[in-house]
Image (tube, grey):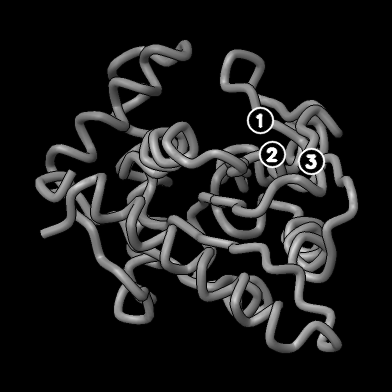
Amino acid sequence: MHSLSDLVERITELRERQAASQAAQPATGQTGRVLLGITGPPGAGKSTLAQRLGALLPGAAVLGMDGFHIADRELRRLGLRDRKGAPETFDRAGFASLIERLRGGRDEVFAPVFHRSIEDAIAAEQRIGPEVDTVITEGNYLLNWPEVAVLLDEVWYLDPPTDERVRALIARHVEFGKTPDEASSWVMRSDERNAEFIAGRRADADVVLVWADL
């Protein structure tokens, strides 16, 4: 079982180890920055947990993978709009490149932010400055994309009971404009297909969390 305070303590320990490693080997170019990933299936509560942790950790920033959704106009051109949220509907290379920049230095960077109200991202809306020593990134495919996973200090897998997660996911789709029937159809056709793919890497997580833990 993991409480929120347990998780904050774990991140604090990661920070301390990173700082000690940087001090011991300054020539390696290590930044002393912690990069933590929170992954899991759609509707698991990843962004909620990431925001709660970020609020409790001074010097932390929360980075959502959803900012790298390919825009709807381009998805329609590609014939992928009805698969939005699937791995192929993200700018995977762009996301990996940003994580690599965060890993490799403490320069100021800007990241896109996804807004459900418009179903699109706004470019360069989030600033992550050199003062940020912990980046909590959350998204579906952090373990499925090896070029991302290798850059993260730890990846936690959030895995609530399926029935509760699906109910929450349907409610979220309804909140942002779908009818209950449309929301249920989307979840079972698209989101749950993605969930099966994501679950294939569950065993690779450093920590597995369920809602009861929090």
| Residue 201 shown left or right of residue 184 in the figure | right
Compute the Cα span from label 2 to label 3: 8 Å
Q: Are marks 2 and 1 in contact (CB under 8 Å)?
A: yes
- Locate residue 173: give its quadrant: top left
Q: Check disc 3: other Cα within 10 Å, few if <14, some if 14-19, many if 20+.
A: some
Q: Residue, x 81% and y 87% (percent of image)?
A: 28
Give the residue at mark 3.
111
Compute the Cα span from label 2 to label 1: 4 Å
Q: Residue, x 35% and y 57% (percent of image)?
A: 195
Compute the Cα span from label 1 to label 3: 10 Å
Q: Which of marks 1 and 3 is in front?
A: 3
Q: Residue, x 88% and y 46% (percent of image)?
A: 108
Q: Quadrant of the C terminus?
A: top left
Give the residue at mark 1.
114
Determine the secondary structure under disc 1. Answer: strand
Residue nearest the viewer, comparing 4 with 200: 4
Q: Are marks 2 and 3 in contact (CB under 8 Å)?
A: yes
Give the number of the disc on residue 67.
Answer: 2
- Locate residue 113: give its quadrant: top right
Identify residue type, mark 1: Phe
